[in-house]
Amino acid sequence: MEKTRKTARSRKQLIHQKETISIVKETAKSKVRLSKLLFIPLIIFLIVFIFPHLPLVKKVETGQMKNNDYTARKIAVFEEINPKNGFQSKIQLGDIVPKLVSYGVIDMTKMQNLYQGRGGIPKEEMELLTKASNKPLVISASNANWIVNLLWAIGLSNKMEINKESPIFGPDLNNFASTGGWNLGKEDSGGAYFNKYSLIPLNSSQQKRVKMIAENTYRPCCNNSTFFQDCNHGSAGMAIIELGVSEGLSDDDIYKTLLAFNAFWFPQNYNEIALYFNVIKKTDWHDVDPKLALSKDYSSITGWMKNVDTAVAKVPGLLPKSQSSGSCGT
């Protein structure tokens, strides 16, 4: 009898244990279901109210390197705009420079005095001053400062009908850096030589083409187009365009040539322009349209400061080392 009672108690205990286990399992399932239900509104709360206010990881500028180390890129870009071996153009000077000497636009004594403190007139320049040359003109970092003087004299004195429409043609003719600043001729002011000698043969349609290109190109020393040749670089630019048109170069070749010469005359400005396109616009310098680079938006001084220098300065580590640019005088 006692054994029967024990068996009955054991069965009741077993049933109670099973019921307890069942309750525990059901409770656990309920907690899981509850946690899932609570998890959904929690996620919604985080998405709506919390995540928008968290500091996001700053998006990398177009073309910007994550570690802001642009050293190698800046070197490569500078070597592209100012190649060590220079830029070989397709334009030739022929006998124009010796003619300028014979006309007195270039006074050899004054030229020699100017370069006496600079190590003397380089052999290459002396050849251009004294002999006709059919070699394509090459500009480099070493000759940029005197190449501009030769081209300046050409652009200043070459006679064209369109020069009568030039903004410098008028009562203030002698008051510009391109005219009053030309002190290497026999005359007291370079204004005496403006539009005086037929150095580069150009018919009326060619002159219109010269004017069109000149009015659409700029340099970073001022806000005037090449046609407004108020400084040495403006006159030099005019010479490049006139020579290019007379020698049958395409518009693209002329823009490319003028851009290359400008880059040697203004290395700091064009270094930043090239970096701007390379890093911010993700366009390599050789893929940039020269006409665009020479436009008022990028090559005028205000366009450069607004659209290039300001943008490049905002990218940490991108601003290049300062480079000296050519002055608007001899």
Image (cartoon, rainbow, N blue to C red):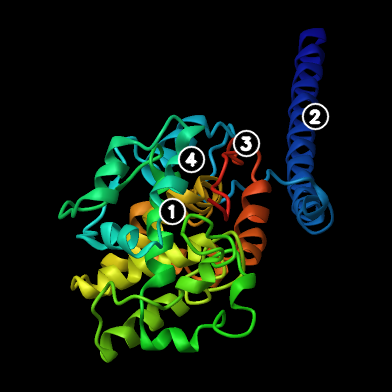
Is 2 placed left or right of 163 in the picture? right
Of the two numbered discs 4 and 1 in the rendering, the one whose residue sits closer to the viewer: 4
Q: Quadrant of residue 1?
A: top right
Sequence-earlier tag: 3 or 1 = 1
Sequence-earlier tag: 1 or 2 = 2
In the depicted structure, whether residue 28 falls above or below residue 203: above
For residue 149, the mark is 1
Quick one: label 2, few (<14), some, or many (20+) residues within 10 Å? few
**Residue that carries the numbered disc 4 in the rendered image:** 113
Q: Which of 3 and 188 is in front in this view?
A: 188
**Spatial distance from mark 3 to mark 1, Cα to Cα?**
36 Å
Of the two numbered discs 4 and 2 in the rendering, the one whose residue sits closer to the viewer: 4
Residue at position x 58%, y 60% from top? 181
Tell me where residue 216 appears, x and y as whole percent.
46, 77
**Spatial distance from mark 1 to mark 2, Cα to Cα?**
104 Å
Sequence-earlier tag: 4 or 1 = 4
